[in-house]
Image (cartoon, rainbow, N blue to C red):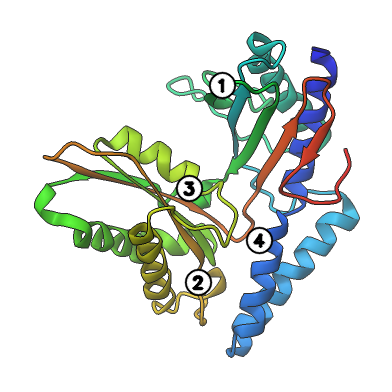
Amino acid sequence: MDIERFTDIIARFLAVSGKILPDDIVKKLAELKAAEHMPLAKSVYDSMSRNQDLAASLDRPSCQDTGVVNFFVSAGENFPGLGKIAGALREAVVRATAEAPLRHNTVAIFDEKNDGTNVGERAPFVHWDIVPGSDKVKVETYMAGGGCSLPGRAITLMPSAGYEGIVQYVFDTMVDWGINACPPLLIGIGIAGSVENASILSKRALLRPLGSHNPNPRGAEMEGLLEDGLNRLGIGPQGLSGSSSVMGVHIESAARHPSTISVGINVGCWAHRRGAIVLDKDLSYEILSHKGVRL
């Protein structure tokens, strides 16, 4: 594998995903604006649209907080140079930070130092899946900003709390902290048998395209009910009240222990900097999240 070309592609893609929102997010924001009846809320949506136009025309990030970069990598077992991918992703973050540019957000724990590169101890954090029989690699990027990370929570409930307990926990979190995350929000929920699994699943839920549903009909129903209920809170864009509080609710799950039910919550703000790109072994690529964009 041409590791230099791989690194350059990812660095350029990071820059794009920091400046241009994914196609499904742009479409959803337009739909929410069209359905909005409150003048102030419509004005906020107008400012969001203007923000995106300026980010594109000025070639600047769509939000000053470009977050801490997370990668979710689905690597084919036959993709060449698997052992070099992690290093290439790290270098891509360094390059994108300097060239995009991205704000320096990575601070060392305990030492409280920021070296201005957005890399550090386990940063960027890389989540791995190995895909049997494949010679492609899918790289999903997510810029986790400070505001949208504030409502991140996880808890293990007593099994008697049931699914009603999950709903209560989600609503309590959104009422307490949701306004900090720059609504309308994308809510990612993980349900599993331990908090670490639930937390990772809730972050993975944010990577799903809007309009997708949990494969279990009951899970899909729960997503819809939560979305409807959260919108009834009337938080509105940027927390200034309005018809919609969320862009969607996504639930990912894993089988649990009979004595526990764990819940994780992660939130994406309106400027949901998510990206997905698939590279072949010859490093030709397809961008899934931003159709028509070339690097």
- Which type of secondary structure does the marked residue at label 1 adopt? loop
How far across and down, in percent of the image, does residue 203 sit?
A: 47, 43
Query: Going from the N terminus, do you reach mark 1 or mark 3 first?
Result: 1
- The residue labelled by disc 2 is 239
**Badge 4 vs badge 1, beta-carbon distance below 8 Å:** no
Q: Kindly report the distance in space between the C-alpha atoms of the residues bearing marks 2 and 4.
A: 18 Å
- Name the kind of residue labelled 2 in the image: Gly
Q: In the depicted view, which residue is nearer to us: 241 or 252? A: 252
Q: Is residue 101 visible?
A: no
- The residue labelled by disc 4 is 25
Q: Kindly report the distance in space between the C-alpha atoms of the residues bearing marks 2 and 3.
A: 23 Å
**Badge 1 vs badge 2, beta-carbon distance below 8 Å:** no
109 left or right of 68 in image: left
**Badge 4 vs badge 3, beta-carbon distance below 8 Å:** no
Q: Which mark is residue 72?
A: none
Identify the image quadrant of the C terminus: top right
How far across and down, in percent of the image, does residue 128 sit?
A: 53, 24
- The residue labelled by disc 1 is 132
- Name the kind of residue labelled 1 in the image: Pro
Q: Kindly report the distance in space between the C-alpha atoms of the residues bearing marks 4 and 1.
A: 31 Å
162 left or right of 100 in image: left
Q: In the depicted view, which residue is nearer to us: 289 or 255? A: 255
Query: Going from the N terminus, do you reach mark 4 or mark 3 first?
Result: 4
Using a 10 Å C-alpha cutoff, classify the residue at mark 3 as few (fewer than 14 neighbours), some (14 to 19) or many (20 or more). Answer: many
Identify the image quadrant of the N terminus: top right
Residue 274, placed above or below residue 227:
above
- Which type of secondary structure does the marked residue at label 3 adopt? helix
Of discs 2 and 3, which sits in the foreground? 3
- The residue labelled by disc 3 is 205
